[in-house]
Image (spheres, rainbow, N blue to C red):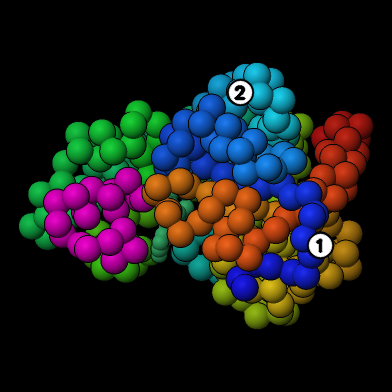
Amino acid sequence: MPGSMAHDAGMETIDLHTHTTASDGSLSPGELVAAAKQAGLKAVAVTDHDTIDGLTEAAAAGRDLGMEVIPGVEISVERADSDSGMHMLGLWVEPGHAELGAFLDRLKQGRAERNPKIVAKLNELGIPVTMEMVQEISGGGQVGRPHLAQALVKVGATGSTQEAFNRYLGNGKKAYVPKFRFQPDEAIAMLRKAGALPVLAHPGLLELGKQALERLITGLKGMGLMGVEAYYSEHRPATTKALVSLAARLDLVVSGGSDFHGAAKPAIALGRGKGGLAVPASLLAGLAQARDRLRAAGR
Ligand code: AMP
Ligand code: ZN
Ligand code: FE
Ligand code: FE
C-alpha cells in the first residue's frame, strides 16, 4: 500500500496537504473543509500553490462546521541540482500577511506570463486550446498546468491529463515553459516571517538517493527549514519510514498529507491518498510546538 505505515484501525487522522479552486483543485475551500469533516479527519490544512486566497473562506467553513483548519500554502522554489524545482509547504500562515501577499503576487505574475506562452506552444503544435478555455476550466483561481492538461483532453489532443503531462506539459516536454521561482532560502525566510512552519513537501518525489536527500535537507535546515512531509500519497512505506527517522536525526518535525486535488486528480482521495495513506493526528502536537517555538523566537 503506497504511503502507508502500520497503524491502528481506529487511529485519528489528518490531511495537511490539499488544494482548492484557489489554485488547481476542483473543490472550493468551503467544499474542501466540508469534505474533510465528512471524511472524519481531525484537521485539514489548505495548501494551495503560490496563493493564500482560499484561506478566509476555509477558515469560515471551519468555524461553521467545527473543523480544525490549518491555513497553509505550497510555494514552488528552485532546486540547485535540477531544473524541475521543488515545493515548500508553509503551515499556519497568517492570512492577510501583507509581505507574504506581495511575495506570492510575484509568483502569480510569473504564472500569468507563463500560461499564454504554453498555449502558444500548443497552438504551434496544431492544438487548438485557448487561454479563455483554460480560464474557464480553472474556475477563476490560479491557472496551473493541471488546467492546461484538462484543456488538452477537452480538445481531444490527449486521452488523459497524465498523457498531457507525459507528452506536452511535463518538465522538458514539447510545450514546457519554465516559470519564475524564488530560491529556497527566500521562501523559507518569508514563511517564517509570516509565522508559518516551513516544511519540505513530498521529498520522495525528488528522486534522490539517501545521501543526496540527507545533504539537501541538511542544507535546507541551515536556511531555517523546520519539517519534512514524510507521509504522502506517492511515498512508499519504506520512504515514509526513512523520512521519519531522518527527521528525528536532524531534529525536524514530521508532517503528512495527500495532495488532494479533487476531480483534477481523481486517483487521490482526501485523507487516504491512493488508499493506504493514514497521517496520524498525533503529529499535530509536534508541529504546533515547532510553530510556537518559531513564533516565540521572533521568527
Ligand atoms: P504548475 O504549478 O502550473 O507548474 O503545475 C504543477 C502541478 O502540475 C503539480 O502540482 C502537479 O499536480 C502537476 N504535475 C507536474 N508535473 C506532472 C507530471 N509529470 N505528471 C502529472 N502531474 C504533474
Ligand atoms: Zn496542484
Ligand atoms: Fe507539490
Ligand atoms: Fe500540492
Magenta portion: prevailing SS class = helix
Q: Nearer the viewer, residue 29 or 180?
A: 29
Name above or below for residue 158 compared with residue 97: below
Q: Is residue 140 above or below residue 179?
A: above
| Mark linked to residue 61 | 2
Q: Which label belongs to residue 100?
A: none
- Asked if the residue at label 1 sits under 8 Å from ligand 4, the reply is no
**Residue shown at 88%/35% (left/top)?**
292
Residue 234, picture quadrant: bottom right
Q: CA distance from mark 2 to mark 1?
A: 29 Å
Residue 186 vs residue 131: left or right? right
| Residue 34, horizontal then vertical, whole percent | 58, 32
Classify mark 2: residues with Cα within 10 Å, few (<14), some (14-19) or many (20+).
many
Q: Magenta segment range?
A: 145-163
Mark 2 Cβ inside 8 Å of ligand 4: no
Horizontally, residue 297 falls left or right of residue 279, namely right
Q: Which residue is mark 1?
A: 8
Q: Amino acid at mark 1?
A: Asp
Please give the name of the residue rendered at 72% of the width and 55% of the height, measured from the top-left corner. Answer: 279
Q: Residues within 10 Å of mark 1 (few under 14, many from 20)?
A: few
The magenta stretch spans residue 160: yes
Front residue (pair 88, 245): 245
Task: Report which quarter residue 62 is drawn in.
Answer: top right
Secondary structure found at label 2: helix
The amino acid at mark 2 is: Ala
